[in-house]
């Protein structure tokens, strides 16, 4: 299996101190990147060998709980899921190179729980963020086929200023610009707006469903639950009707965490299962260009993970 996470994977004696979502991610990533198949017993044995559990029964209970979580992910993602599952064994059914968006989201989910990750790959998350925006855009376009999805977020390849972003958004929605001068500062960039998602009508009039979306690819995603700030955006654009906020993150959230985050977003929340569920609408929902960029980002990271797992 892949090297064990160094965070949130603590020794469990009388209670489980290994986080269920990270345990499930670790199993999923191990099957995708290293092991063709793993049994409940295989995984429990590793947890004991790595001194995360002392009791064999308790270790197997933890893996059984992960099995239930993995089964839920399989149900929601559908045919695009990279593994199959029965009562005893999880099996890989596609190579990560064939499912780069899946592998990309798994690695983003695992990265915060390896304390050596930043040392290996640095603090520059610009490319990671841009790729995640493009994956989110592709997923939305596959699932919302009659909606328009426009990438507004500032990136190295799209280093536009706030004035241009506001002009484009207002023009697309048929709205009037507001008090842009109050917010157009050097570091304003796009005021937290990464994607504009809207469903126009043939009459081209205002009052249409609009989502202003933030794409949060890192461990600090919870700090972005209130971004973009709708009050600020209603100040820079005179929206006839208030748009709705949306947030995308690459993590597979528990029901409790999903409810809490959805309430904070007060709009549309897209976690990993919802994003990757695009495969149920269109098996080839990624462009070849985006697939190639994702593979180039993933390869060095999987190599390091495999080296540390030997």
Image (spheres, rainbow, N blue to C red):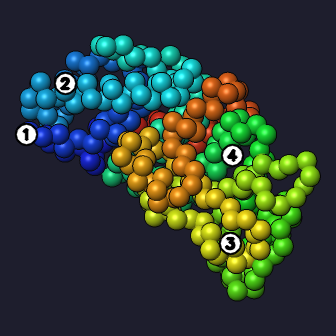
Q: Which comes before the other along the chain, label 2 or label 4?
A: 2
Q: Which residue is drawn at 58% across and 32% down?
A: 277
**Image quadrant for the N terminus?**
top left
Q: Name the residue under label 4.
A: 137
Q: Name the residue under label 3.
A: 233
In this rendering, would 152 be left or right of 98? right
Q: Which comes before the other along the chain, label 3 or label 2?
A: 2
Does residue 307 appear anywhere in the picture? no
Does residue 43 appear anywhere in the picture? yes
Q: Which residue is drawn at 59% across and 70% down?
A: 229
As measured in the structure, the alpha-carbon distance from the residue carrying label 2 to the one carrying label 1 is 14 Å
As measured in the structure, the alpha-carbon distance from the residue carrying label 2 to the one carrying label 4 is 39 Å
Q: Residue at x 64, y 75 (%)?
A: 232
Secondary structure beneath label 2: helix
In this rendering, would 219 be left or right of 148? left
Residue 115 is situated, as x and y percent measured from the top left of the image, at 33, 52
Q: Name the residue under label 1.
A: 14
As measured in the structure, the alpha-carbon distance from the residue carrying label 3 to the one carrying label 2 is 50 Å
Q: Mark 2 points at which residue?
A: 60
Secondary structure beneath label 3: helix
Residue 118 is situated, as x and y percent measured from the top left of the image, at 42, 55
Whether label 4 touches label 3, CB < 8 Å: no
> Which label sits in the foreground, 3 or 1?
3
As measured in the structure, the alpha-carbon distance from the residue carrying label 3 to the one carrying label 1 is 50 Å
């Amino acid at each position: 299996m892949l090297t064990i996470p160094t965070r949130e994977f603590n020794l469990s004696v009388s209670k489980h101190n290994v986080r269920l979502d990270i345990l499930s991610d670790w199993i999923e990533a191990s099957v995708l990147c290293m092991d063709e198949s793993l049994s409940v017993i295989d995984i429990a044995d590793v947890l004991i060998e790595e001194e995360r559990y002392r009791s064999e029964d308790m270790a197997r209970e933890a893996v059984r709980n992960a099995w239930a979580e993995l089964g839920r992910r399989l149900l929601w993602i559908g045919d695009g899921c990279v593994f199959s599952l029965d009562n005893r064994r999880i099996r890989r059914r596609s190579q990560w190179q064939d499912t780069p968006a899946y592998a990309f989201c798994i690695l983003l989910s695992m990265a915060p729980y390896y304390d050596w990750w930043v040392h290996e790959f640095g603090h520059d998350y610009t490319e990671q963020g841009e790729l995640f925006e493009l994956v989110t855009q592709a997923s939305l376009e596959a699932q919302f086929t009659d909606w328009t999805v426009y990438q507004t977020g500032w990136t190295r390849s799209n280093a536009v200023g706030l004035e241009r972003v506001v002009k484009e958004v207002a023009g697309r929605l048929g709205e009037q610009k507001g008090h842009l001068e109050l917010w157009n500062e050097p570091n304003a960039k796009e005021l937290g707006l990464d994607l504009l998602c809207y469903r126009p009508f043939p009459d081209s009039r205002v009052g249409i469903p609009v989502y202003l979306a933030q794409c949060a690819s890192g461990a600090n995603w919870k700090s972005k639950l209130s971004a973009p700030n709708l009050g600020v955006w209603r100040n820079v654009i005179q929206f006839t009707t208030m748009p709705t906020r949306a947030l995308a993150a690459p993590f597979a959230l528990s029901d409790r965490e999903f409810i809490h985050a959805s309430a904070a977003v007060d709009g549309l929340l897209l976690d990993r299962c919802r994003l990757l569920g695009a495969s149920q609408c269109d098996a080839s929902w990624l462009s070849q260009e985006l697939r190639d960029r994702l593979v180039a980002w993933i390869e060095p990271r999987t190599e390091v993970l495999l080296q540390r797992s030997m």
